[in-house]
Image: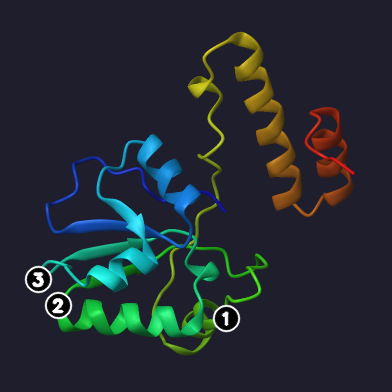
Amino acid sequence: MPRIFFLRRPFPDTSVVLAPQRQQVIDLARDGLTQTQTVRECLQRRDLAEHAVVIVDEAGQIDGKQLLDLIRLVRDRNGRLILCGDTRQHGPVEASDALRAIERYSGLRAADLNQIRRQEPKRGRTIAERKHIRDYREAVKAAAAGEVGRSFEKLEKLGAVVE
């Protein structure tokens, strides 16, 4: 599912956006977010501000121990933790089902995102790039709708499927 980082006002100074992998952090920064770092960096530095708002992108890719450590750190700073991720996605081997367990057993209310915002054609610099993004977005929509065959056909036409 798409990112939820479309905010109408700037983040407070006590906010931070985390992601499991360095490339995800780079992508978040490219999308205009300035206070970004990996989950591991945050846990190693432990310099989270008091009452910080911590937003974690792709939270389903975090292993269980890291997520527990992050929850404890945020709790110790009297902060808020927002976990964003798709529990239907398959994560890396070291990831756990912690996000799915939180969703299923915590009693917390989850927000559902049902509109794709990440693949935005307007971000393309050229007409060809905008068309490529638009076509890629259509492939993502097809996959989200369960039309896997149609999605792969579109991705193959884009040259995104490599054997």
Which residue does the numbered mark 2 point to in the structure image? 77
Q: Assign a secondary structure to mark 1.
A: loop
In the displayed structure, 57 sits above or below 94; it is above
Residue 3 shows up from this direction: no
Query: In the drawing, what numbered circle is on residue 22?
Result: none
Which residue does the numbered mark 1 point to in the structure image? 96
159 sits to left or right of 79: right
What type is the residue that disc 2 sits on? Arg
Disc nearer the start of the sequence (1/2): 2
Q: Nearer the viewer, residue 106 or 157?
A: 157
Q: Assign a secondary structure to mark 3.
A: loop
Q: Residue at x 30, y 73 (%)?
A: 43
Which residue does the numbered mark 3 point to in the structure image? 50
Q: Nearer the viewer, residue 94 or 116?
A: 94
Q: Nearer the viewer, residue 12 or 144?
A: 12
Q: Quadrant of residue 61?
A: bottom right
